[in-house]
Amino acid sequence: MARQSGYDRHITIFSPEGRLHQVEYAFQAVKKNQNMTSVALRGDDSVVAVTQKKVPDKLMDKDFGTHLYNITPNVGCLMTGMSPDARALVYRAREIAAKFKDKNAYEIPVHYLALKLANIAQVYTQHAYMRPYGVSTILVSIDDEKGPSLYQIDPAGQYFGYKAAAAGTKDQEAQNALEKIVKKKIQFTEAETIQQAIGCLQAVMGMDFKASDIEVGVVSKRRRPRRPTVDAQRSTCELIAKCHQLFPPTWCFHLVLPIPLPGQNEWLP
């Protein structure tokens, strides 16, 4: 009906039901563009983001593409949807963060960065010569005042703080699974948060993941501000797998975003 009536021809045209069909199509682009699902879970001292890793071309180097990005040394993001749009929005976020630090002499708070990105997404729903970003953005960080923080921004420009979030093809199933985890009201440690997040995604997808099937991003108070070496990743993964006996010792972190403990002058191991 919308296509026949022409209400989906321009993003600025409301249908008689009060809907913006082009914005709804942007939500469908997040779900169907790469046919992947992402989840994020907030623990007591960390936030974990897990997503599927798919290689669209057999000739493509699997280590080249990623859905996890650093915005600042203290803020990371997980992008689900169209990769070109994700890359463009990540660079906008980095520009905003850099200008904020240059002006104020301290890192941008993650909630303010979420607001700025949501404002950009919302403006793109108002003009006929623009189109919304076809991505769902999940920001993770350890805030100095609020502790572990998790925010999600959708293509319409709406953003909220979450205890757990999901995006992609099976986002509704993932949200239902995450609700069961959150209802337990357990303060998860870093290792338990990683375990629960990967377990949730495995349950939703109905499959056991190999190392090459997923990407895992972690923000934690106890980690150094650097990308870990392969040996360090492997040893960490083997330790967690040995403790929980749930996942093979081959999966590893793709991204680690560490935060110093408040009041400490040096980074703690």
Image (spheres, rainbow, N blue to C red):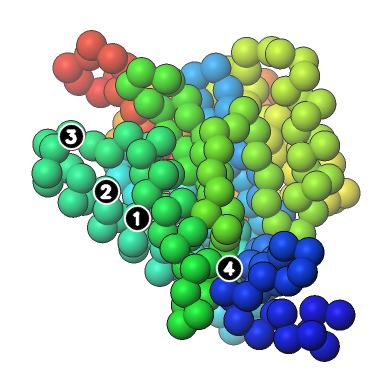
**What residue type is disc 4 on?**
Gly
Find disc 4 in the rendering and name its residue.
134
Question: Mark 1 and mark 2: span between their CA atoms?
Answer: 6 Å
| Rendered residue at 70%/39% (across/down) | 198
Q: Is residue 67 left or right of residue 174?
A: left
Question: Mark 1 and mark 4: span between their CA atoms?
Answer: 16 Å
Within 10 angstroms of label 4, few (less than 14), some, or many (20 or more) residues? many
Q: Is residue 24 left or right of residue 147?
A: right
Quarter location, residue 23: bottom right
**Residue 21, image x and y in percent?**
70, 71
Quarter location, residue 135: bottom right
Question: Is disc 1 placed on a helix, strand or loop?
Answer: helix
**What residue type is disc 2 on?**
Ala
Tell me which numbered mark, 3 or 2, is placed earlier along the sequence.
2
Find disc 3 in the rendering and name its residue.
106
**What residue type is disc 3 on?**
Tyr
Quarter location, residue 200: top right
Question: Is disc 2 placed on a helix, strand or loop?
Answer: helix
| Rendered residue at 36%/44% (across/down) | 113
Tell me which numbered mark, 4 or 3, is placed earlier along the sequence.
3
Find disc 2 in the rendering and name its residue.
97
Kindly identify which numbered label has been placed on residue 93: 1
Tell me which numbered mark, 1 or 3, is placed earlier along the sequence.
1
Evaluate whether residue 212 shows in this view.
no
Within 10 angstroms of label 3, few (less than 14), some, or many (20 or more) residues? few
Residue nearer the viewer, 71 or 137: 137
Q: Quadrant of the C terminus?
A: top left
Question: Mark 1 and mark 3: span between their CA atoms?
Answer: 16 Å
| Rendered residue at 64%/23% (across/down) | 192
